[in-house]
Every structure is written in structure tokens, then in C-alpha cells.
Image (cartoon, helix red, strand yellow):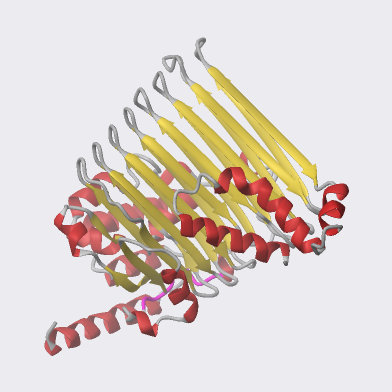
Amino acid sequence: MTNVSVLVKEAEMMEVVAVMAAVADFSEASVRALSAARNEPRWMLDFRLAAWRTFEAMPWPKSTDEAWRRTRLTGFDLKNFTAYATPQGVSKRQALSPLLQSELGEMESAASVVFQDGGVLYRNDNPELAAQGVIFTDLQSALLEHPALVRQYFMTQAVKPEHNKFTALHAALWDTGAFVYVPKNVTVELPLQAILHQKPGVGGYHHTLIVADVGSHVTVVDDLLGGVNGMQSGVIELVMADNSVVRYMNLQDFDHSAWNFLTGRAMMGRDTDLRWIQVSWGSRTTKAFLDLELNGPGGHAELLGLYFPTGRQHIDHQTLQIHNAPNCFSDLLFNGALKDRAHNVYMGIIKVLPNAQKTDAFQRNGNLILDGTARADSIPGLEIEADDVRCTHAATAAQVEDEYVFYLMARGLTRPQAERMIVQGFFQKVLDRVPVESVQHKLERVIERKIGG
């Protein structure tokens, strides 16, 4: 890039910063300023404005709403946050914080991108992927460089703005996000990595959009950090064409003062294969809606979850396994441990439509309670409209047996070490199914940190 080009880019960035900083509250003016600062096409501005009107028209969740009966928004107020962050420009890897350098170094990836301040902070592109037709970029760049693909898939099929109050807010103010498109019959051998580091006190709206074409294979890892006294309203969209294979991991480790709202859905075609790992370590409060929709025969889906709330954390996952086609399999396993005065909620439904004969679906939620003051609510359920199916669900909540701890302590382990072994053993059924070894080790280290050993 020439010096002139660099100066032009710097001037453009300064203009973007000035426009976005001028209006930073939750309003239609903010939506317009955000879109103008990013030089978005008219159709995206219209999309954002329509979503903003939807957001304003929708009521806030109430404690009488079934989905929110056990998770309340006491203490939550948009006025406590800056509406959005202002991008500061791209940095070199050596200029990143030690935390972000460490996160990048933990996993061997085909390509990576780091988001901060509502924009791209660092990127490591791979020309070999581009030569195969693979697109892995930030969503803002994709909007300008691949507008037809973005317009076709962005919040049109999997998650729509009207899905809930927070998806409408997200659609109006989305900022960071990874866009992945894998062409027909292409396999991406190494994972694609996206890291979000959210700055304090701001609203964030991270979006993941993965489009896997016919016969393609891809693994994507989202790593979400930071967010002190902030709010994140994220969306995940996984669109899978026939015979595609997707491995997706969402690793949420926000600061314990952050509010985290997440809505994700996978749309699966014929003979697709999905493994989705959802990890919830951080946040003050997390409310996550996670759906699988199997729309073609032969689909195979696994939705696996790990959570470990401590202190006064509140973690709430609500899942939906929708079987729209025959001869499909779905397996859900969410295991969590709880300490101190933490509260976990799990609510899940297996829904089988009339034409989805030969469905095989399972749902299990297990809770390991490490303190008598912790609480776990588990509400699994079935809605079956077909007569030739096998659908089962199970839920457990149990405390660590003292004799197990004493047995291990009698052999020289400290209490934290004994608890760590028991908890890791409890988590192992999920950890064994994490498809990236370095991510397994990362999760094990966080479990150690949570236990305090």
C-alpha cells in the first residue's frame, strides 16, 4: 500500500471515529450514524431502521413470560451503556495486548481475526483459502465486498430481527462479526478463529454467519472476552447445505459484570453433520436461545454445552431441537458445575413435526452442585407429533459426595485438587467431543481457574 493510500485510509478512519462518537446513545439517530460512518449500502440502512422500529415496538421481557420466568432483568438498563464502540483501526500482532497474543497463540488456525472497539483490530488472512473460494472475513468487509451473499443470508433465514427483543436490537446496531462462506465440496482443514475483546461500558453486537455449501467441511471457533460493565447482544447463524459438515465452538468468557444475550440457530439440509459446542464461563447474566432445525432427511446434529457459574453468576440456556424431516438424529448434552450462590437455568424442547418419522433425539442436562447455596433449575420437554420416533430426555442435579473428596484427599490431594478431578470427570463426556485438542486444554484450564485450584 502506498503512502498516499495509507493517508487516505487514516483520514477515512478519523472521519468514521468523529461521526460515530458524535451520537452514542440508543436512538434512531445512532442507527443512522453507525450505518453512515461505515459507508453501508442503502439496503443495509433500511434493514437497520426497520429492525430499530421492531425493537421499539416489542415489549421488554417480563417475569410472567415463560422464557423469562427464571431469569429477570433486574438492574439492567440500556442507559448504563454507551450504545456502541468506536473502531480504532487495525494493529500489528506484536502491538496486541498480552491477553490477545496469548489467545491467538493457543490454537493453530487456518486464518484468524481479532475484533475490538466495534471493528477489526488484527487479521491474519490465508491466500490459499481465498484461492479455493473460501471467504473468511469480518462482516463489515463482507457487506462491501460480497453484498449478494450477505444480503441473501444475513438474518433472513436462521435468525430474523423479530425473533426477540435482543435480536431486533442486534439487527439495528450490529458491529463486529465473522462471515464464513465455504464453497461446494471444499474442506478447510484447520479451524478458522475469531476473537472478540469487548471494551468496558459499551454495547456490543457480535454476529457469526457461517454458510457451508454442498459437501463442504469447516471448523470455526469464536472466543469472546472482556466486557467489563458492558452488554453483548450476539447472534449466531449456521446455514448448512446438503452433505455439509460444520464444527462450531462458541467460547464465552466475559467479565462477571457483563450482561450477555445470545440467539443462535442452525439451519440444516439433507445429510448434514453439525457439532456445536456452547461454553458459558463468564458474564453476570447470560440468556441464550439456541436452536437446531433439521430440514432435510439424514441430518445429524450435536448440541453440547459447558457452564460453570460461580459467585452470583446467573446462566440460562434455552434450547430447541426442531425435527422437520424424517430419519434425523439430534443429541443434546449440557453439563455444568455450580459454586457459591450461582444460579443455572436450563430449558429445552425436542419438537418433532408430523412428517418427521424415524426421528432419534436425545436431551440431557446434568448439574454438579459444589455449594449448598447454588441452585440449578432444569426443565426438559418433548413435543411429539409423529408416531414412529425415539425421543428421550433426562435431567440431574447432585452434590459432590463428601466421601469422594475425602477419598482423594486421603491420597494426598488438596480439597481444590480433589474437586477439580471430580468436576473434570463430570465434564469429560463433553470435553471428549470437543474437536480441537488445544480448545480442550483451554477449557480444562478454565475449569481449574473456576474451582480455584
**Residue 141, image x, y percentages:** 24, 64
Residue drawn where x is 50% and y is 76% of the image: 99
| Residue 71 makes an appearance in the image | no
Q: Is residue 220 left or right of residue 164?
A: left
Q: Which span is picked out in magenta? A: 81-87
**Residue 2, image x, y percentages:** 12, 86
354 magenta-colored: no
Give the farthest residue toward the top. 387
- Residue placed most toward the observer, 420 or 358: 420
Vertically, is 311 above or below 356? Answer: below
| Residue 184 makes an appearance in the image | yes
Dominant secondary-structure state across the stretch colored magenta: loop
Give the farthest residue toward the front. 411
Residue drawn where x is 70% and y is 45% of the image: 70
- Residue placed most toward the observer, 287 or 213: 213
Q: Is residue 91 left or right of residue 222?
A: left
